[in-house]
Image (tube, grey):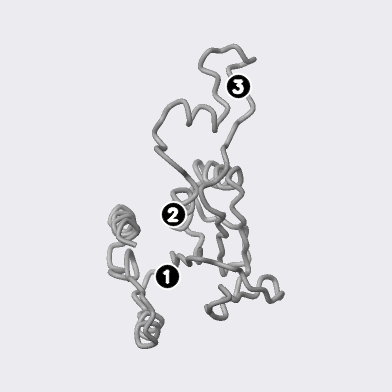
Amino acid sequence: MIGAGGIGFDVAEYLTHEGASVEPAKFYAEWGIDTSYEARGGVRMPHVGSPARRVHLLQRKASKVGEQLGKTTGWIHRTSLKARRVAMSSNVTYERIDDAGLHVCIDGERQTLAAEHIVICAGQEPLRELYDGLRAAGCAVHLIGGADVAAELDAKRAILQGTTLAATL
């Protein structure tokens, strides 16, 4: 995933879940909540099942991934993704995408991240050069969220567009 802002974190959370995420028992297990109060303080060791997908969350900034998230909730998002084994890298330069995957430079070290899908959650202006170039090259690409309409960014609209698109792929 290119982009580790609020929407990037939300999408990573969504992609690593499997099944219904609103089941209370699942939530309690993931956060170590003992509703029977058998465990001391009503707290158990958290249990997070295997993630539905392997996700690598990338950001250009050199700061800690997720540092810009809300002070009262950011730790929750970072903790949740760490429990799902989401790799997080900062100080990333994006070089190209090809059949081998996403070619990046992380902290000065070039590497290729093998990827079946690349999700871009970056930018707040609809720069369409990449989109136009990929379409001209015959690639199947889609515009959603802020890449579609950057004015008045709307996370609900972006998530709906992403979910609707994913259901059609």
Q: Amino acid at mark 3?
A: Val
Q: Position of residue 22 (x, y in %)?
A: 39, 34
**From the viewer's perspective, is residue 44 above or below residue 6?**
above
The quadrant in which residue 159 appears is bottom left
Q: Position of residue 16 (x, y in %)?
A: 50, 48
**Label 3 element class:** loop
Dot 3 or dot 2: first in sequence order is 2
Q: Amino acid at mark 2?
A: Val
Residue extending furthest toward the right: 109
Q: CA distance from mark 1 to mark 3?
A: 40 Å
Viewer-nearest of discs 1 and 3: 3
**Label 1 element class:** loop
Placement of the C terminus among the 4 image quadrants: bottom left
Q: Which residue is mark 1?
A: 123
- Which mark is drawn over residue 77? none
Q: Which residue is mark 2?
A: 11
Q: Position of residue 105 (x, y in %)?
A: 65, 75
**From the viewer's perspective, is residue 148 above or below residue 7?**
below
Point 51% across, 60% down: residue: 4
Please state if 29 lies on the left or on the right of 18 as rendered.
right
- The crowding category of the residue bearing disc 3, from other C-alpha atoms within 10 Å (few below 14, some 14 to 19, many at least 20), is some
Q: Which residue is mark 3?
A: 43
Q: CA distance from mark 3 to mark 2?
A: 28 Å
Please state if 108 lies on the left or on the right of 67 as rendered.
right
**Label 2 element class:** helix
**Front residue of this view, candidates 55 and 106:** 55
Q: Amino acid at mark 1?
A: Gly
